[in-house]
Amino acid sequence: MTWRIGRVALGLAALLMGSALSQAPAAADMVIGVAAPLNGPFAPLGQQLLSGVREAVADVNARGGIAGQKLKVEAVDDGCEAKKAEAVANQLVGSKVRLVVGHVCSAASQAAARVYAAAGIVQISPASLSPRLTEDRAGPGLFRLARRDDAQAGAIADLLLSEFGAARVALIADRSAYGKALSDAVKERINAGGLREAVNLTFEPGEKDFRGLASTLKGEQIDALFVAAHGADTGALKAAMDGLGLSVPVIAGDAVMGTEYGVAAGAAAEGIRVAFLPDATGLERARPVVERLRARKDEALGYTLPAYAAVELYATAVAEAGSPDGMAVAAALQAGRFETVLGPLRFLPSGDADLPGFAFYDWREGAFRPVARTD
């Protein structure tokens, strides 16, 4: 089948879904899967995915659903582990999901992607960053809204080189796959730029006491610190450093983006910069979503809007394809250009979105806020 798909607007898609597709007889609910860590240290990121998907599903259902079917969310906890992710992927296949939004951790996404590809299910990951996810793409139904780790490492390394190129910089990572991959990539890039790290240390995720690590950093007389770990551990380390009177700039990866960092860091929270997706909360299309969440005491943090966009994209692609068939929807996603809460985007042949790269945020007034650009 040949697909002729031009610029796609979700407003038109809503009309299509509300007319031709909705003329079909009422059918059972269409199941949308959310696969993410819902417990443990990375759970805050999983909850961001779940929040975004639920909000998008509510909006789609308010417009009549997709192809005459209302959407239903099934969430599964993958524990950020490849083996468990493969098991829950098979569970979602058994539930006859049409779309999976997930996973967060790259190893989990890669393991599950093979299962979804074999079943002809569309998978859109808002959060997995490993380049291998799309370089070794499991099938044409796999797409990614997250930026790749190599792009994040490049942005962090450029910052370290430009601001701390002659300083004593420490690299610290937790021993998760995420922490090791990001820290190794940053190390490679700063070394190539002529900066040799003064300290390179690791710790177990969920460490109970960071005072020993903070003491080591103080003894090394570091000038700046890069951390590749999740928010709670990074906050606890920042608090331990503050307790010893060690006040140096801290740079961190995207896993820190969330309120749990501030809870753990307490009064020591300021003085950190985090690499993350460019802020989309002020975009015209995103603003109503952000305001509705805020009215319910929820915030569009981290991966909330990318998860919303995943459902938004799927609904549009079904309307374009005229069918919820997985391969037809995948072809529509691959060929179209879409208006989303993240801004306009299209998917490259690899399955990666052509969204802008990383931006930096700092902690001010009790939240992460975009760092003003100076260029």
Image (cartoon, helix red, strand yellow):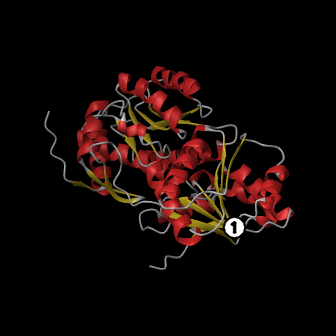
Residue 128 in view in this figure? yes
Residues 105 and 170: in front is 170
Q: Secondary structure at mark 1?
A: loop
Residues 306 and 197: in front is 197
Q: What residue sits 49% from the left and 43% below the top? A: 128
User: The N terminus appears in which quarter of the rendering?
Assistant: top left
Residues 39 and 167: in front is 167
- Relative to 347, does residue 248 appear above or below in the rendering? below
x and y, in percent, of residue 101 in the image:
47, 39
- Per the image, the residue denoted by label 1 is 223
Marker count (numbered):
1
Query: 131 left or right of 188?
Result: left
x and y, in percent, of residue 68 in the image:
35, 37
Q: Identity of the amino acid at label 1?
A: Asp
x and y, in percent, of residue 21 in the image:
28, 39
Residue 146 in view in this figure? no
For mark 1, does the 10 Å Cα neighbourhood hold few (<14), some (14 to 19), or many (20 or more) residues? some
Query: 373 left or right of 256?
Result: left
User: The C terminus appears in which quarter of the rendering?
Assistant: bottom left
Residues 75 and 150: in front is 150
Q: What residue sits 15% from the left and 45% below the top? A: 4
Residue 261 found in image quarter: bottom right
- Farthest residue toward the bottom? 374
Q: What residue sits 40% from the left and 31% below the top? A: 98
x and y, in percent, of residue 96 in the image:
43, 24
Query: 290 left or right of 319?
Result: right
